[in-house]
Amino acid sequence: MSVQLDLLRHGVTERGGGLRGSLDDDLTAEGWAQMRAAVALGGPWDALVSSPLRRCAAFAEELAARLGLPLQLEADLRELHFGAWEGRSAADLMHDQAAELGRFWADPYAFTPPQGEPMQHFEARIDAALQRLRQRHAGRRVLLVGHGGVIRLLLARARGLPRSQLLAVEVAHASLHGLSLGAAALHERSLNGEG
């Protein structure tokens, strides 16, 4: 039995763009408004699952309380750890690590940022979280509040994209995406339940 999974990326954070990774930023007022607007016409959900980082968890806690739904914080759904690049923007990295940044963008599986988390490890922990989610929520519709990297990985897989195209997948702040999580595969679906 599959899980209908709605993926919501967090909104704009206080420290702005760049590679946030494991940095634990709060949402701005705009970020809160973006997320509230994104879920206004969504659902109904049976449960909420969230990354434990504040930019995701604070909104998930508010929404769970408002809707009277159970919330599970899932540590394995944290964003990719960018190591020495955490908190830096691509424009900033272009000044002193342009070649390394280019290698990462071209193939994030072949190049890991200095002191960063290898993509294979990131992918393995996301897969472990998905397996637990599938077991706990079979037959249910779940809202997952997460990060751009997590959602990008899941969408790329659902679309059958090669690893080299992972970073080409667009995931805007507070964007909502639908997946069907089956026993063997992920499939993208429209949020109204069709497709």
Image (cartoon, helix red, strand yellow):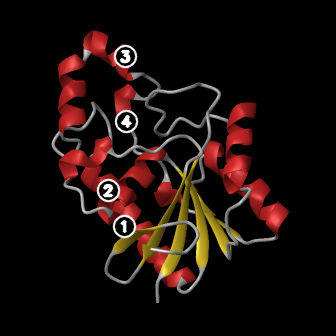
Residue at image location 66% in from the left, 51% down from the top: 38
Mark found first going from the N terminus, 2 or 4: 4
Q: How many marks?
A: 4
**Res 156 label:** 2
**Res 91 label:** 3
| Camera-nearest residue between 27 and 176 | 176
Residue at image location 43% in from the left, 75% down from the top: 181
Q: Amino acid at mark 2?
A: Ala
Near mark 1 (Cα within 10 A), the count class, few <14, some 14-19 or many ≥20, is: some
The answer to the question of whether label 4 and label 1 lie on touching residues, with beta carbons closer than 8 A, is: no
Q: Most extreme residue toward the top, as rendered?
A: 95
Discs 3/1, front: 3
Q: Which residue is mark 4?
A: 82
Discs 2/3, front: 2
Q: Is residue 184 above or below residue 20?
A: below
Residue 49, position in %: x, y? 60, 65
- The quadrant where residue 192 appears: bottom right
**Res 127 label:** 1
Discs 2/4, front: 2
